[in-house]
Image (cartoon, rainbow, N blue to C red):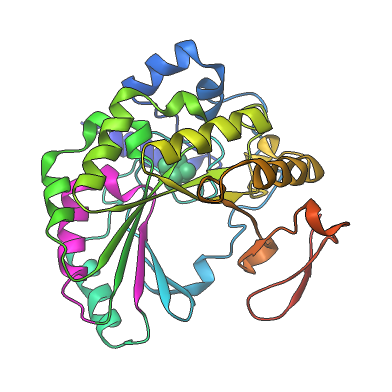
Amino acid sequence: MKNEIEDKIEREESEPPGLAVKVSGHLRKLAKKSKEIEREFFKSEDEDLEDGYTDPLIEDEYEKVPGLIWKYPKRVLILMTKKCASYCRFCTRRRRVEEIKNSCLAKKQMEDICKFLETKSEISEVVVSGGDPLAEEKELIYFINQLKKIKSIKIIRIHTRVPVSNPDQISQKFYESIAKIKKQAVYVSVHFEHPDELTKKTIEVIRKLRQAGAIMLSQSVFLKGINDSFEILEELFTKLTFIGVRPYYLYRCDPVAGAKHFLVDFEKERQIATRLKAELSGIACPTYVIDAPRGSGKVPVALGFWGKCAKKLIDFEGKTIEFE
Ligand code: SF4
């Protein structure tokens, strides 16, 4: 008899790609009281899979070893798993995230990545992402224990949403494994979108990660109907700094197929970001960036302090890019 996972794979092979609905009990409870959290995680009729890009950041072209994306000279991105604790409807990697069997890198693949990194001494920073690597805690612990043995790696960065999407899922073992990393700086970047996500459980996870020695950062995306207001973002970033999380990046939503209804008017974003910069403490204000079209990397958006903003960017390789 086929199990549920096999049925799902079969369905995915015969139907157009679409992000599964997976929402933890923790978020379901929050969504009953917060329409913004409901909009973040529950499917709506606005999802249009025909409009937008499937891989807006062109990550797949930079995959050097299975799971390893090497685009910038000194750091690599590792897409460790396709799984997440819950799926965000606006996900840029919705082409990759899915609840399928064997979605996590196998131990052998992790070891191959480590062998590759050992031959590239210029790479000093590893960003472990997914999916959500903390959704596969046991595998993540194994992986970081391998990565920390590589002498040239000085920074291990973990990108996760589990502290928001299912805080109960994180075990003591994970905090202990972070605390045991002595030779690298460990950064944990948590994806936050709205102040309603800052529950007691989430704040407790942040406290434990800090206690284990992790340097805490946050990332957020401008999302229509969720956080496209100065007041909401000001509250979110202020509260994050109060609990020891440094707001790091605020992104413009990528024009990804199925998520374009989350795109906020660009000029509105710029005005909000300008006011945030003017009114927030420097340590509470993230850098507002656009992931430039077709894989040209993150570019900080010129804020209102310098007059008119041209819709032309110069990317990390010096190419001039125009965007909509
Ligand atoms: S947790 Fe991250 S990778 Fe997973 S669905 Fe949300 S945005 Fe995408």
Q: Is residue 115 left or right of residue 231?
A: left
Can you name the residue that lies furthest to the top here?
32
Which residue is found at the position 62% from the left and 31% from the top? 227
The quarter of the picture where the N terminus appears is top left
- Please count the marks in the image: 0
* Most distant residue in the right direction: 308
Relative placement, left or right, of 124 versus 232 is: left
The quadrant holding residue 276 is: top right
The answer to which of 278 and 191 lies nearer the viewer is 278
Q: Which residues are magenta?
A: 124-151
Asked whether 18 falls inside the magenta stretch, the response is no
Query: Within the image, what quadrant is residue 324 found in?
Result: bottom right
Please provide percent x and percent y for residue 151: 21, 81
Quarter-wise, where is residue 294 in the image?
bottom right
Residue 136 position, x and y percent, is: 24, 46
Picture residue at 16% right of the left edge, 47% below the top: 174
Image point (28%, 73%), residue name: 113
The residue at 28%/65% (across/down) is: 185
Is 133 inside the magenta-drawn segment?
yes
Image x and y of residue 180, in percent: 11, 59
**Is 135 drawn above or below residue 289 in the view shown?**
above
**Residue 162 left/right relative to 298:** left
Which of 317 and 273 lies nearest the eye of the viewer?
Answer: 273
* Above or below: residue 128 compared with residue 153: above
Image position, residue 98 (x, y; %): 40, 43
Q: Ligand 1 shows up in which quadrant of the image?
A: top left
Regarding residue 297, the answer to whether it shows in the image is yes
Evaluate whether residue 13 shows in this view. no
